[in-house]
Image (cartoon, rainbow, N blue to C red):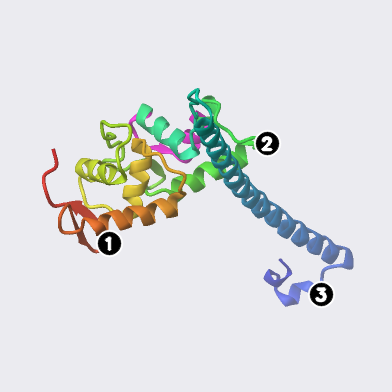
């Protein structure tokens, strides 16, 4: 702040004026630091909650294998899945603030979150996932995101990849295919990066037989019924 004041004017300021300017500068820097820390903690909290849910799901699955009675594991929806549902309901591009408001109306907001920090979390999710498209300040689902899942509940990842590419209008990156497979209902304990790696391996395994590759994007090359 003081650096923006011409040197010739500084000599006209009293000691009290200088102290006031220094105090304002210190408060601005402290506020900015606190806001950045708050956003960082919100992201960390979301990651911790996802890890807790994954551990709980694995424990329930293990318990189900040790008992004769079947146990149904109900996985909580991720923020990304909630955003997708909102977009599918509205069916028109929306600003991030409108998406956040609709999520709050649906009861979707992290524990201990306030509206401002939750908005930041929603905004980061819109930037992070490949299935969301931004046009100016409006967000929507990319074409082909709502690909239908294969008919069988036990469908393989390859079948999900085929279903996603069959529904897509343009070739897709492996990361985009992974995101759309999750939205279509593919079940996995892998995170986004881990699933992308597995999708890439599946694509390469069937390259030139089912899939074609060009500039890091994949498409189907054979008709699939």
For the residue carrying disc 3, how many other residues have a C-alpha within 10 Å: few (<14), some (14-19), or many (20+)? Answer: few
User: Element under label 1?
Assistant: loop
Residue 182 percent across, percent down from the top left = 38, 41
User: Element under label 2?
Assistant: loop
Residue 93 percent across, percent down from the top left = 36, 37
For the residue carrying disc 2, how many other residues have a C-alpha within 10 Å: few (<14), some (14-19), or many (20+)? Answer: few
Residue sitting at the far left? 223
Q: Give how far apart the Cα atoms at labels 1 and 2 are.
A: 40 Å
What residue is shown with label 1?
216
Name the residue at 81% across, 75% down: 11
Q: Nearer the viewer, mark 1 or mark 2?
A: 1
The span picked out in magenta is 90-102
What residue is shown with label 3?
11
Q: Are marks 1 and 2 in contact (CB under 8 Å)?
A: no
In the rendered structure, the answer to whether residue 154 lies left or right of residue 71 reads left
For the residue carrying disc 1, how many other residues have a C-alpha within 10 Å: few (<14), some (14-19), or many (20+)? Answer: few
Whether residue 173 appears in this view of the structure is no
Q: Quadrant of residue 3?
A: bottom right
Q: Nearer the viewer, mark 3 or mark 2?
A: 2
Q: Quadrant of residue 2?
A: bottom right
Q: Earlier in the sequence, mark 3 or mark 2?
A: 3
What residue is shown with label 2?
112
Name the residue at 29% across, 34% down: 149
């Amino acid at each position: 702040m003081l650096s923006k004041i011409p040197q010739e004017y500084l000599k006209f300021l009293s000691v009290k004026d200088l102290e006031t300017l220094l105090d304002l500068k210190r408060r601005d820097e402290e506020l900015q630091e606190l806001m950045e820390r708050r956003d960082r903690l919100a992201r960390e909290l979301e990651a911790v909650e996802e890890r807790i849910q994954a551990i709980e799901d694995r424990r329930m699955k293990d318990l189900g294998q040790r008992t004769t009675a079947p146990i149904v594991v109900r996985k909580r929806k991720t923020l990304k899945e909630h955003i997708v549902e909102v977009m599918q309901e509205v069916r028109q591009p929306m600003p991030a603030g409108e998406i956040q408001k609709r999520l709050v109306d649906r009861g979707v907001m992290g524990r201990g979150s306030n509206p401002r920090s939750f908005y930041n979390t929603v905004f980061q999710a819109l930037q992070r996932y490949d299935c969301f498209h931004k046009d100016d300040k409006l967000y929507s689902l990319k074409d082909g995101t709502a690909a239908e899942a294969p008919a069988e509940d036990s469908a393989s990842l390859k079948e999900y990849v085929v279903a996603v590419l069959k529904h897509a209008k343009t070739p897709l990156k492996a990361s985009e295919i992974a995101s759309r497979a999750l939205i279509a209902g593919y079940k996995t304990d892998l995170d986004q990066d881990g699933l992308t790696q597995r999708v890439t391996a599946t694509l390469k395994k069937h390259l030139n037989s089912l899939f074609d590759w060009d500039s890091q994007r994949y498409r189907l090359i054979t008709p699939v019924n």
